Amino acid sequence: MSHDTWYRRRGEGGTLDDAYNDSLLLLEGRLVMANKSLKDFPAMPLAMAPVGIKRVNPLIEAELDYDQEALRAHVERSLPLLNRD
């Protein structure tokens, strides 16, 4: 996950440690949606406060986290199956 985050942020000049922290922040956001926290898992490190990234509402982020190519392919396959009504 941290390598994916680093790959997405590579143009911003962040380090792999920054990406690791960003990944922990993303994971914390997902856990919050399940009423959990990284603090509930003692073996896990805690994320540091975000520096230089925008905090996004985890619910919005989850809604926007989809494979655009897969969605486009699904629409192209399904569109001809629709009827006029």
Image (tube, helix red, strand yellow):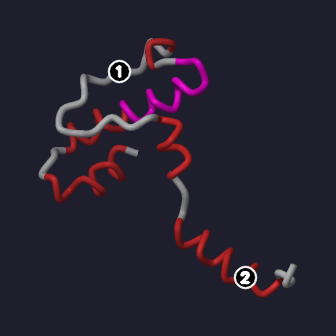
- SS under mark 1: loop
> In the rendered structure, which disc, 1 or 2, sits on the residue that comes first in sequence?
1
* Quadrant housing the C terminus: bottom right
In x, y percent, where is residue 17? 21, 37
Q: Work out which residue is located at the far bottom of the displayed protein and give it.
A: 80
In x, y percent, where is residue 45? 35, 21
Question: Which residue: 53% across, 37% down?
Answer: 59
Question: Which residue: 83% across, 83% down?
Answer: 81
Instruction: Decide if residue 12 is on the left or right side of residue 61.
Output: left
Classified by dominant secondary structure, the portion drawn in magenta counts as: helix
**Amino acid type assigned to the residue bearing label 1 in the image:** Pro
Residue identifier under label 1: 45
Q: Is residue 16 magenta?
A: no
* Numbered circle sitting on residue 74: none
Magenta stretch bounds: 25-36
**Amino acid type assigned to the residue bearing label 2 in the image:** Arg
The quarter holding residue 36 reads top right
Instruction: Decide if residue 74 is on the left or right side of residue 84.
Output: left
The quarter holding residue 21 reads top left
Residue 24 or residue 58, whichever sits in front:
58
In x, y percent, where is residue 53? 24, 39
* Numbered circle sitting on residue 77: 2
Q: Work out which residue is located at the far left of the displayed protein and give it.
A: 13
As displayed, is residue 56 above or below residue 67?
Answer: above
In x, y percent, where is residue 82? 82, 81
